Image (spheres, rainbow, N blue to C red):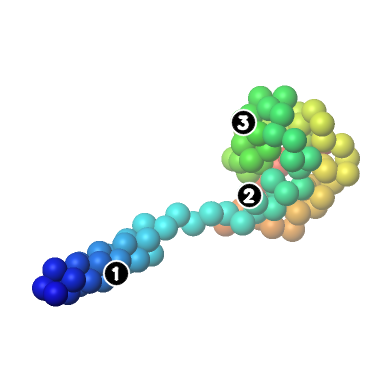
Amino acid sequence: MTALITLSIMGLVLGLGLAYAAEILKVEVDERLEAVTNFLPGLNCGACGFPGCAGFAEGVMDGDVEKLSDCKPGKDVHYDPIIEYLAEHPNPDGTLVKISK
């Protein structure tokens, strides 16, 4: 019975510690990154030179990509919403992401 109580208390303390650590150490993700990734074709082909569409979207957000046409399977139907979205959602410092077709 003592072992059961001890393990229950240890589980509770360690669980609370993990919950606290998860809250303190969480990484804030830019929601614009997910939106730009969703506008891309989603083929994850790597033809752009980045590791999949998420890597390309991160390159767009970081300014490493100058032209959206580097995404080979993408078309204007993919590029135009990205340009409009980024024009409406500036960086946290207020600057706009400069990107062209």
Residue 98 at what x, y percent from top left? Answer: 71, 42
**Snapshot quadrant of residue 6:** bottom left
Judging depth in this view, the residue of 15 and 73 nearest the camera is: 15
The numbered mark at residue 41 is: none
**Snapshot quadrant of residue 66:** top right
What is the C-alpha distance between the residues marked 3 and 1?
37 Å
Residue 7 at what x, y percent from top left? Answer: 19, 67
Amino acid at the residue labelled 3:
Pro
Residue farthest along the left direction in this orientation: 2
What is the C-alpha distance between the residues marked 3 and 2?
15 Å
Q: Is any atom of residue 48 visible in this view?
A: no
Task: Estimate how packed mark 1 is, as few (under 14), some (14 to 19) or many (20 or more) residues with alpha carbons within 10 Å.
Answer: few
Looking at marks 3 and 1 on the same chain, the residue that comes earlier in the sequence is marked by: 1
Residue shown at 53%/54% (left/top)? 29
The numbered mark at residue 33 is: 2
Q: Is any atom of residue 53 visible in this view?
A: yes
Residue 83 at what x, y percent from top left? Answer: 78, 47
The numbered mark at residue 16 is: 1
Which residue is identified by label 3? Answer: 51
